[in-house]
Amino acid sequence: MLRRALIVLPILLAACAESEPPKPAPEAPKPPEYQPLKVTLKPNHEFSPEITAEDYAQHIFTLSSDEYEGRDPGTLGERLTMNYLENELRRIGFLPAVGVDGPCKAFPCEHASFFQRVPMVSTTTDPATTLTIDVGGQKQTLAMGKEMVIGTRSGENTVTIDGSELVFVGYGVNAPEAEWNDYAGVDVKGKTVVVMVNDPGFLRQDETLFKGKAMTYYGRWTYKFEEAARQGAKAALIIHDTAPASYGWDVVVNSWGGAQHDLPKSEDPEPRLAAQGWLSLDAAKNLFTAAGLDFEAERQRADQRGFTASALSAQLSGTIQSTITNNASNNVVAILPGTEKPNESVLYSMHWDHLGKNEELTDDPIFNGAIDNATGVASALEIAAAFAASPEKPKRSVVLLFTTLEESGLLGSRYFVKHPAVPLDTMAGVINMDANPFVGRVRDFSVAGWDQNGLQDLLGDVLKAQNRVPSPESNPERGYYFRSDHFNFARAGVPALHAGAGDDHVAYGRAFVEEINRKYDEVAYHKPPDEFDPEWDYAGSMEDINVYYELGRRLANSGEWPTWREASEFRLTREASDESRQ
Ligand SMILES: [Zn+2]
């Protein structure tokens, strides 16, 4: 309405120009100002079958409320979330997809549930745990949550480390295809490795090493522990540093306090360390200094080809007491069976879990996880409603996978990929939604793991309707392609896309978006302030959800099988099952 008034006014002025003295030319009409889309929540909200900001906000508000206690697996927060999802999925009209006695052959499936039980072992380390480092008789005490964090995945209530030799192994990378092995010529059996986060090439941004600034899987903390265990180490300590880790020490401390969840060994037979944790940067520097080494020089050395591990002439000791419970959590799996090709599918993945609460934080103990990842769950429910209400139902099945234990190392999706409710070989693609930001309307759509597979091309087509383009993620050093559930599908060969709101605001440009993201990372990411905010602008979120929906709809209605790019590390795995897609 405002725009029209501006146009009408100059015409009126022109009409009466003859009888009046000449006036200065009217000012050019201003471009319309950017209109954010705000939502005011109302009591007794009624959900609509369309994708609306009001529905979206309502889902996020409920799931991230204090009542849900941060949605920690195995707690009251899980029970409330399971209830909510089951009720919503039934209301929307999606069917349970988990066969009670083995995978369903067809849908609707007589004995099926929405819940896939995921067994887990929960380990809570005594917060009073200390470790001692002895460097030539000089002892340093490290306290849990201050100079270090430590835990065990061994399933043992008591783990004793008694004078385990410390060895600095640089980035701790063993990558035969890159002819790089930080463990070459060193025996770490029974020892404790001290390792840097991120991967070679990061420090000097050397593009010839491990994609330079961009992070590869070798840079992830999960990889560091996996490799150290394969090498036979007793324990591993990662040196924290904010830039290469991409998050602060407080995020590490928050993530390692409270119960740590694992799959039982029967589900995950890979070797495990007796103890694993992180050292604060200061603690690491003290250790190197006491050992007579220059930390900066060692770090530079680790970033160069030809690095060799060095003993720190120091020993680690300590007793780690833990409370261990055998427990279970749940993935939630729902399906809208395809009308023509029900055995082929498109899968949306999004984790429902978050970090729970920490009673030691007296101000605000609850990690509400509003953005991470009530947004992804809420997006999926909106998309599901749109699919269920569309007059033309999709030809391929549409599957929703709400995963558990994503925050514990992508365990729920790992379990699903091992026990899929629908076949992976005829899954055309996975669309992952995790921590969708509120940055307003943007010109682009940011793709993690740029140019991995053909889903990116399909995304490009879908974005045209909104005058948007796919763009490479702005922080490839953070390794987002390895940090959410789609990664387990990629490892199993299923083309997977992890993409979301872009970086270039339609009215305020890049600096504006950068500032919102920076603030979120600093203040809210994996912290209690990740809460529902009544000031959020939903204009961009609505566009993004429509993109996710349209992408899934097109893939579900096409006979297309997106493929991995020639250079992708996941291509060969998929090609091994090519025959099942002919
Ligand atoms: Zn997340």
Image: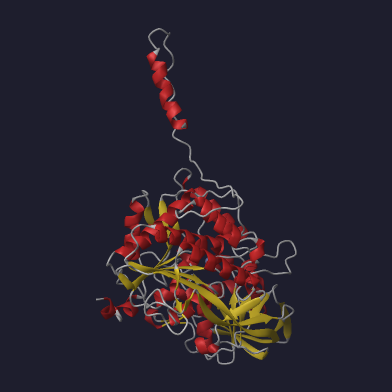
Q: How many numbered marks does the figure carry?
A: 0
Tell me the residue at 44%/56% (across/down).
Answer: 545
Identify whether 498 is placed above or below 174: above
Front-lying residue, 365 or 142: 365
Q: Nearer the viewer, residue 208 or 390?
A: 390
- Is residue 439 at least partly visible in the picture? no
Residue placed farthest to the left in the image?
582
Residue 222 at x, y percent in the picture: 52, 77
Residue located farthest toward the front when viewing the structure as drawn? 110
Residue 36: horizontal and vertical position, in percent?
A: 51, 44
User: What's the colour scheme?
Assistant: secondary structure
Q: Residue at x 41, y 61 (%)?
A: 388
Report whether residue 130 is seen.
yes
Q: Quadrant of residue 462?
A: bottom left
Across and down, in percent, residue 231 comes to: 51, 89
132 on left or right of 13: right
Q: Name the spot of residue 11 as percent of width and height, x first.
A: 39, 20
**Which quadrant is home to the C terminus?**
bottom left
